[in-house]
Amino acid sequence: MKKSLILLIVAAFLFQSCAKIFYTPDARTLASTQKIIAIIPPKVSIAARKKVDGNALIEQQKTESINFQREMYGWMLKRKMQGIIIVDIQDVETTNAKLSNAGFYNGKPLTPIDMCNILDVDGILTSNYSLSKPVSEGAAIAMAVLTGFWGPTNEAVASLSIHDRGSDKLIWNFDHKLSSSLGSPAKLVDDLMREASREMPYVTRVRTY
């Protein structure tokens, strides 16, 4: 029992210690002046595998991008309703429609300040996810039942950044490598956001989750 507890503590320490955090001295001050932000569709890259068609992989990355965006939005909206997050979040349908009209999905280069202006928001949350090939929750559970081993089925290197429209600068960045026994976007986003929110300037000091 004691050995198991020690292993859990060590694992938790390693999980947290690999995160890299950057924020400007005025990050919380600038964040407190923002009324509404938008979550930009993440850039998602999935490790190529043998016998996987390149076009299919590209489509999967696009699908995962929207999945991750929606999960991040849902996660933050829930905390907003709980009074944990202090800023409003633009709904993803509005965000994506405005970005589409601006040529975002056709590869038009847009700077953070360009996106803030297009979306008419005070700040944006951008992100990147580098994934091993996602494994569905059903497949992960079946594998655990057959093998008796519940190990990581998906690894992700994720980066979150907040840009402020008023100052036109990056005010916060969070880089983290994590793994999950279930490869769904919901699980990965929940793990990531729980860690990132410890220092995210939109989050109040008191949390109830």
Image: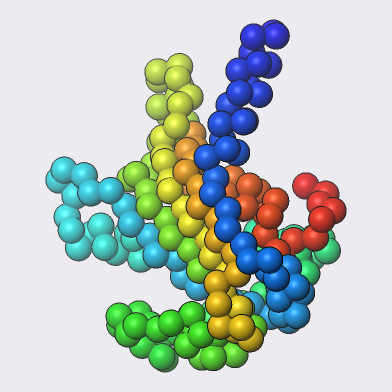
Left or right relative to 87: residue 11: left
Which of the pair 191/182 is nearer the observer? 191
Rendered position, 13 above or below 31: above
Q: Residue at x 17, y 55 (%)?
A: 53
Residue 171: x and y, percent?
Answer: 60, 69
Left or right relative to 87: residue 169: left
Rendered position, 18 above or below 189: above
Residue 197: x and y, percent?
Answer: 67, 54
Q: Residue at x 81, y 52 (%)?
A: 207
Q: Residue at x 65, y 16 (%)?
A: 6
Residue 88: x and y, percent?
Answer: 72, 76
Rendered position, 32 above or below 110: above
Residue 101: x and y, percent?
Answer: 42, 91
Which of the pair 142/34 is nearer the observer? 34
Q: Residue at x 63, y 47 (%)?
A: 195
Which of the pair 179/116 is nearer the observer? 116
Asked whether residue 79 is in view, the answer is yes
Left or right relative to 8: residue 104: left
Quarter the N terminus occupies:
top right
